[in-house]
Structure formats: structure tokens, C-alpha cells
Amino acid sequence: MKLAEQRTQSSSGDDLRARVEALGPWFHNMNLDGLWTAPDHFLGDYPGVKFRRFAPQLPKDLSGKSVLDIGCNAGFYSIEMKRRGAGRVVGMDSDERYLAQARLASETLGFDDIEFRKLDVYDVGALGERFDVVIFMGVLYHLRHPLLALDLIHEHVADDLLIFQSMQRGSKLLMDVAEDYEFSEDEHFHESAYPKLHFVEREYAHDWTNWWVPNRACAEAMLRSAGFSIETRAEDEVYICRKGELPYGQWQETGAVYPAKGA
């Protein structure tokens, strides 16, 4: 290699390192042409190590499919969908720094056609379109209104496949839950396997944005309640779902008011 070429590559590498550091800290530890964005990440090669555990359960070929990545962070999953041949890919996040990270990562790795939008999950209806694949990973427990978010995703943007993940705490067990209980019956509420959504009043893991953390039964019940059928529990906290009908009758929008189940 000629000296001039070596200097050019060195200069390019220094420039990329400076851009990565200027946008730090990174939660997605990504390999950008040999430069890791978060080499000291407490989870190591994350989210790559997690993705590799459930990736075999995803469609290998997404040619022509549209993808929406809600809470895209630095764009790891958006990029992985492009690697599988997805057509239109939109990543959305409410944090401008994450979006800047995502644009840098996708540009560096040659996926310039991914579109990144600054949007809140509660504003998904503003997109005005549905997507073949919706990714909703690592977001639910950061929301003050988690079930509303799932309802809006079902109503406005999901067309078929939902890839969902949430941190879970508490029991991993499942129990048979009756269709209904008498008012005097309360034993089931004391069962660890009953669907429970734990409220974090202050902080969890030094993060004030952690609000609601479900146990396994609750995560699965919330998905079903929002109209998603669980096709595969692809990894400990990851579910591949299909959009279906709402289980309690189609609700109608009347402001923020929902009719009773079965109405």
C-alpha cells in the first residue's frame, strides 16, 4: 500500500472516531468498519449478541418488505433488516442524539437509504402508513402508557409481523387464568405467575425512564390484549407476533375513552 493511501485511510479512521466520540455515549455497541461504538458496554457486544440468539426465527428474506423500527436508538435493527433485503425501512426515535448516531452508523455501513424520523411512539399515526414488519424492542418499559402504545401500533402501523421485546422481571411462569372471577375472589392476584406490571416510581438500574416492568405472563397478556397473536417466543424476552383481531371486540376512538371489553 502506498504511503498516500495509508495516510488517507488513517485520516478517514480518525475522522470516524471523532464523529463517534462526539455522539457518545452509545447504547448500541456497533462495529463501524472496525471501530466499536461502545467498546466498554456493560453487556458487551450488545445488541448483536442478543440478536444472534433470535435471528434464526426471523424471515431470512425481506425483499420488498417495509419495516418500521420504533425506538430505533442507533439503528442496529434497522440496519439488520436492510441486510435481509428489506425495501423501505423507517427508524423512529424521540431522542435526536440517537437519531444522529443511527444516521452515522447507516451511512458508514452503506445503508444510506434508511429513513430516520424524530417521532414519539404515541405519534405513530402521523406516519399515515402501515408496515409489513414493525420492530418494538426495548421501549415498552420506558413508557408511562405502555398498553396505549401497543394499541396505537396495532391500530395505525402494524400490517403483519411484530417483533417485540421488553425487559421482564418477576416470575417467568405462566398459569391458567379464568375468563372471569367473582368480586370476592382474590387469591389469583397473589400468584407470582398471574400477569403483573411492576411500577417503578423513582429509578431502576439508575434510569429514571424505566416506568413499568412486566413479568412474562403480563408481557404476553398485553400483546394478546392489543390484538397480536404470539407466533414464537424467539428468545427469553423476544416475541414474534402476527397482527390479529382485537380479542374483546373492535373499539372505536372516542377521544381517550375505550368502551368496556366485549362492547
Image (cartoon, rainbow, N blue to C red):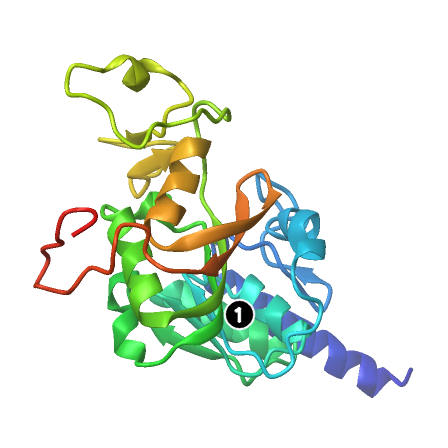
Residue that badge 1 annotates = 19
Residue 170 lies left or right of residue 52; in this view the side is left
In the image, what residue occupies the spot 43% across and 26% down? 176
- Give the x, y percent position of residue 130: 39, 76
Amino acid at circle 1: Arg
Q: Nearer the viewer, residue 124 or 151?
A: 151
Residue 183, percent from left and from top: 15, 20
| Label 1 environment density (alpha carbons within 10 Å; few <14, some 14–19, many ≥20) | few
Q: Is residue 18 shown above or below 146?
A: below
Q: Where is the N terminus found, in terms of image quarters? A: bottom right
Q: Residue at x 8, y 63 (%)?
A: 255
Which residue is more in the foreground, 90 or 217?
Answer: 217
Q: Quadrant of residue 97?
A: bottom left
Q: Is residue 94 visible?
A: no
- Above or below, 129 against 254 in this view is below
Classify residue 54 as left or right of residue 239: right
Residue farthest right in this picture: 1
Label 1 SS: helix
Q: Nearer the viewer, residue 83 or 215?
A: 215
Q: Position of residue 92 (x, y in %)?
A: 39, 69
Residue 219: x %, y % from top left:
41, 40
In this rendering, would 248 be left or right of 57? Answer: left
Q: Quadrant of residue 208?
A: top left
Task: Give left or right: position of 153 versus 262.
Answer: right
- Asked if one can make out residue 38 in the rendered structure from this viewpoint, the answer is yes
Q: Residue at x 24, y 60 (%)?
A: 250
Callout count: 1
Q: Residue at x 58, y 79 (%)?
A: 107
